[in-house]
Amino acid sequence: MLDTASNRPALPPEIARRRTFAIISHPDAGKTTLTEKFLLFGGAIQMAGQVRAKGEARRTRSDFMQMEKDRGISVSASAMSFDFGNYRFNLVDTPGHSDFSEDTYRTLTAVDAAVMVIDGAKGVESQTQKLFEVCRLRDLPILTFCNKMDRESRDTFEIIDEIQENLAIDVTPASWPIGVGRDFLGCYDMLNNRLELMDRSDRNRVADSIKIEGLDDPKLEEHVPAHLVEQLREEVEMARELLPKLDPQAVLEGTMTPIWFGSAINSFGVKELMTGIGNYGPEPQPQSADPRQIAPDETKVTGFVFKVQANMDPKHRDRVAFVRLASGHFERGMKMTHVRTKKPMAISNPVLFLASDRELAEEAWAGDIIGIPNHGQLRIGDTLTEGESLKVTGIPSFAPELLQNCRAGDPMKAKHLEKALMQFAEEGAAKVFKPAFGSGFIVGVVGALQFEVLASRIELEYGLPVRFEPSQFTSARWVNGDKMAVEKFISANKQHISHDNDGDVVFLTRLQWDIDRVERDYPDIKLTATKEMM
Ligand code: G4P
């Protein structure tokens, strides 16, 4: 059977029903609240508020670390699976703070779509814009939720214009808000000609929808005050004239985003958004790999690691590798090949992240995220196959933007510190460089807050107080070239040379001038700011 939209053979139903996505937003736009409502309507939790522990504002079950609880930020990316209608949703949580952009970037390599949440009063904010750009690099389809419509918000046309202009994407309204702020009543569902009214009495309840026959239906007046009916008719007519119609193919190609208006805290608009993700969101997509692409319906199982999380549960000193399945039907106990080391691996205790509890995954399909507990064999970027030598591509590592020296509070504990740092480097939480000259380590991160997170985790997980101190270096570049050229370069630039945790040669720089000098004096050496994870 051919899938009419893509002209590709239709996927097996178990794969076709999967929707794997992330939520991108600026802090405070309502990502946590929306996640909670997804879980509620997906049957993964019984009652909203369960996700936030009592008395502690702002934390979801997807926040594992003590540090996150203390600060109310989500440092790690985790995955949650739940069913909605005929669909299986895999929601991969992205860290919200801008300091963790590298982690976020990698998370976005594991999803097929993103839900962009914006605050109706604030529009497109800086972090949304940045994350959007990352999605664009991969042509990820984006579905938009304009949140907090129960508060004073901007004019609907203005919001849509802002998205179109700032993000250069066509916006098509899937719903249209009726009234604003305290007068916000609900939305007119533009796709199904339905009236959706908000139930203000119970935040976790969703009022029944009212089917109407277009905007001239007299039933509209029974539910909406006359002045708002008038305004709604005018606005919808204008929207239909001025804004593009929903084109499912353009949504899948990432050139158009449908927008739903709602209020996550009042559970309003969330089900419509979920239905939209099911209907218009992409099925699991082919994965780029070397030497060939992986199609989701291949019978053989393949997957790749996009995230490693150590010490998720302080009681069990385990490491969990988050694996996105790129193809096939995985069953517990399967023997896979770890392509980097060419070693077989029996996956006997995989976990599926069903919202709150980790459960043993008996089976999983292309599109799903499974967790594989391991002792450090699995690293970010690793590919697992049923024997074929395939390497998933497109999972980059970025040059850090901030560097500091790291020392153990107790000099006798240097070896322990090395072990801890290497572990965090493998998790992708930091870059660790061992300078060719001198002792100690240089730690590189993308955002300053990561130093604090690291210090706190090293103390918490290894009982090791550490100090971060300013380094003379400000940036790092990977050194590429043929063996002879690299050796010559190393011996002439020893003060700048270090090795990263994979043993690759890195040039530490103080000023842009250092980089310019290398480019001028060493034509056979190429310095790069990213490297593919091996
Ligand atoms: P984030 O994860 O994107 O950072 O946002 P989060 O869901 O934590 O929401 C940020 C704040 O916005 C929270 O209030 C939350 O209750 C509120 N909020 C979320 N959705 C809506 C909505 O639809 N309408 C209104 N009016 N507010 C909404 P807070 O006071 O910062 O935290 P809390 O005390 O409620 O936990």
Image (spheres, rainbow, N blue to C red):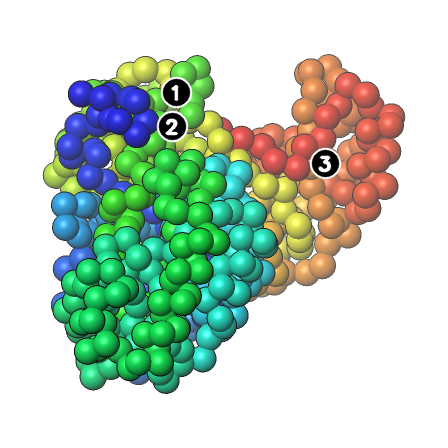
Q: Of the two numbered discs 3 and 2 on the same chain, state the one appearing first in sequence.
A: 2
Residue 61 position, x and y percent, is 28, 63
Pinpoint residue 18: horizontal percent, then vertical percent. 23, 40
- Is the Cβ of the residue at disc 1 closer than 8 Å to that at disc 2? yes
- Rendered residue at 44%/44% (across/down): 256
Q: Which mark is residue 293?
A: 1
Amino acid found under the numbered disc labelled 2: Gln
On the image, which quarter does residue 494 sit in?
top right
Indicate whether 104 appears above or below 146: above
Q: Quadrant of the N terminus?
A: top left
Q: Amino acid at mark 1?
A: Gln
Instruction: Please give the name of the residue rendered at 27% of the width and 69% of the height, measured from the top-left corner.
Output: 268
State whether residue 239 is above or below residue 293.
below
Q: Position of residue 431 (x, y in %)?
A: 57, 45
Report whether residue 472 is seen: yes
User: Could you say which is closer to the camera, residue 516 or residue 114?
Assistant: 114
Which residue is disc 2 drawn over?
Answer: 287
Residue in the foreground of this view, choosing between 440 and 361: 361
Q: Quadrant of residue 293?
A: top left
Q: Which mark is residue 507?
A: 3
- Which residue is found at the position 53% from the left and 38% from the top? 137
Nearer to us: label 3 or label 1: 1
Left/right of residue 111 with respect to residue 501 in the rendered view:
left
Secondary-structure class at tag 1: loop
Badge 1, how many Cα within 10 Å: few under 14, some, many 20+? Answer: some
SS of the residue at dot 3?
strand
